[in-house]
Image: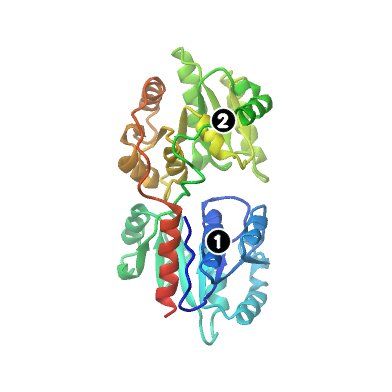
Amino acid sequence: MSVAATPARVLTVVQLIPALRSGGAERSVLEMGQALVQAGHRSVVISAGGRMTAQLQAEGSEHITLDIGRKSLGTLARLGRLRRILRELKPDVVHVRSRLPAWMGWWALKGMSPKPHFITTVHGLNSPGHYSAIMLRGERVVVVSQTVRDYLISHYRDLDTARIRIIPRGIDPDAFPYGHRPDEAWQRAFFAEFPSLAGAPLLTLPGRGTRLKGHRDAIELVAELKKRGIETRLLLLGVIEPGREAYARELQDLINTRDLASQVVMTPPREDVRDIYAMSSLILQLSNKPEAFGRTVVEALALCRPVLGYAHGGVGELLAELYPAGRVPPGDQERLIERAAELLRVAPPISPLQRYRLVDMQRAALALYEEVAV
């Protein structure tokens, strides 16, 4: 689906993000960049760069490399350059998606005339306080779920709720087609790379290398299923990242202690997530803290793959609406084991998705830009 249309007015929209390495907010930057270009607008992203930059530029956006997201005093020294860049670009809208870039953008726009419209998107359930409150200064405050809206209202009593817009993240049904199965060549290559993952149902937990994502719970789940005579394999997809080596070693120690070295594989982020999900018997979402959305829930269900996750935050919200059979009370290991066994035995049917499409998110955000820039 395309968002292409002839715009009534060509806008310049600048998005600020710490970097373009991986992550949900970063992917949203690319998706909105693509939508802006398709709609005939100018899309510019300012960040420290990363592996996603090439795709961003290939899809028509401009990228300016400037590290505005590193939490150090040196970042403040870049404020002058950011101000000069914004004055040269003369954007209609500055859209920020992270707290430090938001502060940098807010300060850089001081005294600028005409002043661009300032929009924020709250992608996470940030600790409430003065530092996080910068995300509420947008003319419009975009939130990715009802969970985030409720969280902001409960912690910031003076927040004008009329400025809040719920725009859920979405997935491209063409990228995650219902009932997709990877071809034989991909399967041969995948199991040649990871032979230990063959021979039993595959459980996949996607997520970066942080304790938030519940990797330990997934490892313990495989160990406990094994005790009950249920053989599985586990892929911790995306856990290996630069700067997270100590955490990966910690997980490997647990894997070895639980005698699962032949059943669990850890990998860096990969581009073939669609095929990996489609090959999986279960997609796990076991974050030990509530998350804002839970995009992988939507991706997996779009492919007609069952999801098992903790029923809190955005993941719980999505599962309650789209796949109630996959909900488990947060941290309830016994119920997690029981439900995993049930879903591996007989998973309830999954209907094609009717909501959370990428084009819906893109159109809503474009309409928001046009609304404020009138």
Above-or-below relation of 86 to 310: below
Q: Whole-percent x and y of residue 86?
A: 60, 77
* Residue 120 picture location, percent across and down: 46, 67
Q: Quadrant of residue 71?
A: bottom right
Q: Nearer the viewer, mark 2 or mark 1?
A: 1
Residue at 49 percent across and 30 percent down: it is 218
Q: From the image, which quarter does the C terminus lie in?
A: bottom left
| Furthest residue in direction top, as rendered | 229
- The residue tagged with tag 1: helix, strand or loop? helix
Local SS, label 2: strand
Is residue 348 shown left or right of residue 201? Answer: left
Q: In x, y percent, where is residue 247?
A: 61, 38
- Percent position of residue 254, x then y: 58, 26
- Number of residue marks: 2
Binning the other alpha carbons within 10 Å of mark 2 as few (below 14), some (14 to 19) or many (20 upward) gives: many
Q: CA distance from mark 2 to mark 1?
A: 31 Å
Left or right of 150 in this view: 237? right
Residue under numbered circle 1: 34
Dot label at residue 235: 2
Q: Residues within 10 Å of mark 1 (few under 14, many from 20)?
A: many
Q: Give the left or right position of residue 113, taking residue 158 as reference.
A: right
> Could you tell me which residue is drawn at 47 percent across and 33 percent down?
283
Point out the tag, 2 or 1, that comes first from the N-terminus.
1
Res 312 seen here: no
Marking on residue 308 = none
